[in-house]
Image (tube, rainbow, N blue to C red):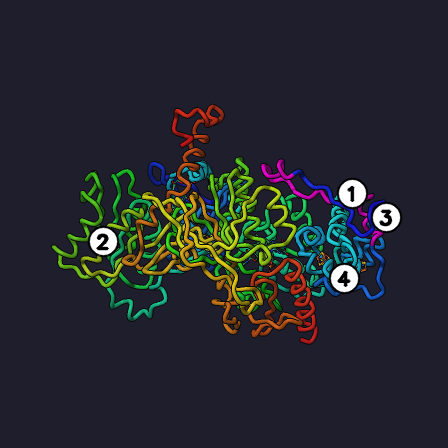
Amino acid sequence: MYKIRKAEKLAENIFLMDVEAPRIAKSCEPGQFLIVKMDEKGERIPLTICDYHREDGTVTIVFQIVGASTKKMAELQAGDSFRDVIGPLGQASEFIHEPAAELKEKKYLFVAGGVGTAPVYPQVKWMKENGIAVDVIVGAKTKDLLILEDEMRAVAGNLYITTDDGSYERKGMVTEVIKDLVQNQGKHYDQVVAIGPMIMMKFVCLLTKELGLPTIVSLNPIMVDGTGMCGACRVTVGDQVKFACVDGPEFDGHLVNFDEAMKRQTIYKTQEGRAMLKLQEGDTHHGGCGHCGGDE
Amino acid sequence: MGDVLKKVPVREQDAKVRATNFEEVCYGYNQEEAMEEAARCINCKNAKCITGCPVAINIPGFIHEVKEGNIEEAYKVIGKSSALPAVCGRVCPQESQCEGVCIRGIKGEPVSIGKLERFVADWAREHGISPEKPASTNGKKVAVIGSGPAGLTCAGDLAKMGYEVTIFEALHEPGGVLVYGIPEFRLPKKGVVAPEIENVKKLGVKIETNVVIGKSVTIDELLNDEGFDAVFIGSGAGLPKFMGIPGENANGVFSANEYLTRSNLMKAFDENYDTPIMIGKKVAVVGGGNVAMDAARTALRLGAEVHIVYRRSEAELPARVEEVHHAKQEGIIFDLLTNPLEILVDDNGWVRGMSCIKMELGEPDESGRRRPVEIKGSEFEIELDTVIMSLGTSPNPLISSTTKGLETNRRKCIVAQEENGATTKEGVYAGGDAVTGAATVILAMGAGKSAAQGIDEFLNGK
Ligand SMILES: Cc1cc2nc3c(=O)[nH]c(=O)nc-3n(C[C@H](O)[C@H](O)[C@H](O)COP(=O)(O)OP(=O)(O)OC[C@H]3O[C@@H](n4cnc5c(N)ncnc54)[C@H](O)[C@@H]3O)c2cc1C
Ligand SMILES: Cc1cc2nc3c(=O)[nH]c(=O)nc-3n(C[C@H](O)[C@H](O)[C@H](O)COP(=O)(O)OP(=O)(O)OC[C@H]3O[C@@H](n4cnc5c(N)ncnc54)[C@H](O)[C@@H]3O)c2cc1C
Ligand code: SF4
Ligand code: SF4
Ligand code: FES
């Protein structure tokens, strides 16, 4: 069992947890993820490792409610436990293997969208710990959905926050901020790292390709085992099929086939929709009524 | 008494009924039937059957005890050679192993060795008999990677010799293919696999799940920081192959591993479990091995019309005869001498069919089987909503890529000596599918056994 030390609501439908997982805390690096399984009957849910405390033996996860399993997970409290936590999985971000001197010469821009702020955080923190100040753009739908602002401010070089509705700081999408920084403010970047919803990463990549900025993205396809055994997570990168759980999750964004990846994410939408309905309506919903859409 | 040339028939669940459930297909013998079948064994002096068993179970020895009604004794005889008799009695390809060389088989049917082994193991479980924990340990620690048949056997044998053994398993349940691959209706998980694993634990073996060697911790760290004196790698061959044809990433195309893992390990067939599975209306399973049969029969039970699409003819099907027979009885349709060319995809990215070509058999290839060749102009389309690719698997590079000095061959298999499992790295042994590529449960167990010997010799010589 893996005990939850801390459980906190960061924003509507977004939660943070510190979980005891000593082996993972000891060996994980930025860019990697883990898998949690709540109980015997639960799904295996992949989540990015957002922070880690090696001495404490804990790791931090941040997740958003999108379906039945994450909804159930949000009900867990400090003191509760996960039945299983597996990891660290996937490759660490490439930059951690680069010689420090070379890395210091490079200018990095991190672009975070929504709950993607969480996976970007450990990377920016790692940079700060290695004496590198990076630029960070964080985009949120609205002010209330902005997460980890203080944490990010403490480790970023320059932090640019934007909200879709203009309820806080800038107004507009992250792509507009990138354009502004590069075209109006004359900034130059050697490497962009973009993490967020698939659609946001797709548009960031379209833009950075135009601007000639190499871009790394972190993909979140559907996964089962996370160890290269099932192929559920396969994505097309360039002309190759890759397994995101072992070859990734980070890839060259300009080579990723986002349209295919987005379609693949919807494979279980109907089944998941049904599970969500069952959870929301409890015993009153049995499916088969044919009116509510739960059977589609 | 029946015809002595024939096996005592075994009771099975009716094909029509079982096609809709996940209960075990075969009921096995009761004691009366087992004793009758045991009487067919002529207790050969030069018992050929033993040479056909990769772990050399004293077959006439245990069968003799069954004949006499001493089932507990029979269990002890088997226990000297095998840690997983209830599993092997069910899934060993007996027709090409022990039973394939049984003297009785020359004129008539061989003795039903597998079903007798299964009876003995089931009887022992039902009567609460399990192996005993060794009295003392020798203070030496061995790490075993993977909890499939190879790892469990190696761990069990080492524990019996007095070693302190810890198994590290990447998944959340121990058992390897026995829990994630082979379906419930052939090998019940709670009823059969779990108790056999429990027996290995009773020998003192610790099992740590959720540890991915090469990620959570490396082999070098196990040896240098965690105080293990030797390591056995039994990590299997879990990496699925795809064909590389157009449309293969469409929604509705799965590897057999994914399909079976969802159904077996994650229990997606049971609606009380959260993991979803695609329940197709019309499913094609590409391939002809045991894995393909298992995927097909799983899809059938979930309610689909299922086709096996295989490029050679029935005679070349690599699956066990019993499994092909069961599949046919249940209503699986075999599209033989047929090879997929492309998966057809609709506008939303979902499978809508498959274009295939007819094949004929030509000259024999390296494997000695006649090579299938395309018949020009015979292309045709089938309508489908689900395709399951079952084209074989290869060892996962997670361990080899993170362990210095561990050599692999061209097929990504770990190089290890057959007699003792020694790899190219000192103190590190390997066996099972990780070394041979996808093979069988009993071969993996044989390899685990040899490696336990090898490790014992290595640590005693130290
Ligand atoms: C490597 C990786 C890292 C991730 N990191 C995070 C993270 O740090 N924080 C976070 O909130 N989420 C993260 N995710 C996504 C998270 O795993 C899914 O949101 C979660 O599994 C959905 O579970 P559910 O049962 O609640 O929703 P479901 O009911 O299963 O799904 C709801 C919808 O979400 C989509 N979906 C389902 N499973 C996945 C999946 N595995 N990945 C992406 N989308 C999916 C489907 O389109 C589905 O329609 C990550 C995914 C991966 C693969
Ligand atoms: C669907 C299916 C049906 C089959 N049917 C039959 C049959 O009827 N009869 C028969 O004899 N054989 C059958 N086989 C083949 C047989 O199951 C295998 O040959 C056998 O299980 C191999 O045993 P193993 O111990 O080498 O590996 P596995 O059983 O594959 O076990 C390996 C274990 O190691 C774990 N692992 C892998 N990497 C790591 C890591 N880095 N760290 C920690 N753990 C790790 C895996 O999670 C797994 O649990 C079938 C196989 C499949 C897939
Ligand atoms: S273990 Fe397999 S090969 Fe050996 S006797 Fe039993 S069924 Fe036959
Ligand atoms: S070869 Fe057949 S008949 Fe002879 S001992 Fe073995 S099982 Fe009995
Ligand atoms: S999640 Fe199964 S192979 Fe990647």
What residue is shown with label 3? Answer: B69
Q: Amino acid at mark 4?
A: Cys
Tag 1–tag 2 contact (CB < 8 Å): no
Q: CA distance from mark 1 to mark 3?
A: 12 Å
Assess disc 3: are there few (<14), some (14-19) or many (≥20) residues with their C-alpha within 10 Å of its C-alpha.
Answer: some
Q: Earlier in the sequence, mark 1 or mark 4?
A: 1
Q: CA distance from mark 2 to mark 4?
A: 66 Å
Q: CA distance from mark 3 to mark 2?
A: 76 Å
Q: How many marks?
A: 4
Q: Position of residue A78 (x, y in %)?
A: 47, 40
Where is the N terminus of chain B found, in terms of image quarters? top right
Q: Earlier in the sequence, mark 3 or mark 4?
A: 4
Q: Ligand 4 is found in which quarter of the picture?
A: bottom right
Assess disc 1: are there few (<14), some (14-19) or many (≥20) residues with their C-alpha within 10 Å of its C-alpha.
Answer: some
Which residue is more in the foreground, A292 or B165?
A292
Which is more foreground, mark 1 or mark 2?
A: 1
Where are the magenta residues, as a range?
A: B15-40
Tag 1–tag 3 contact (CB < 8 Å): no
Q: Amino acid at mark 2?
A: Leu
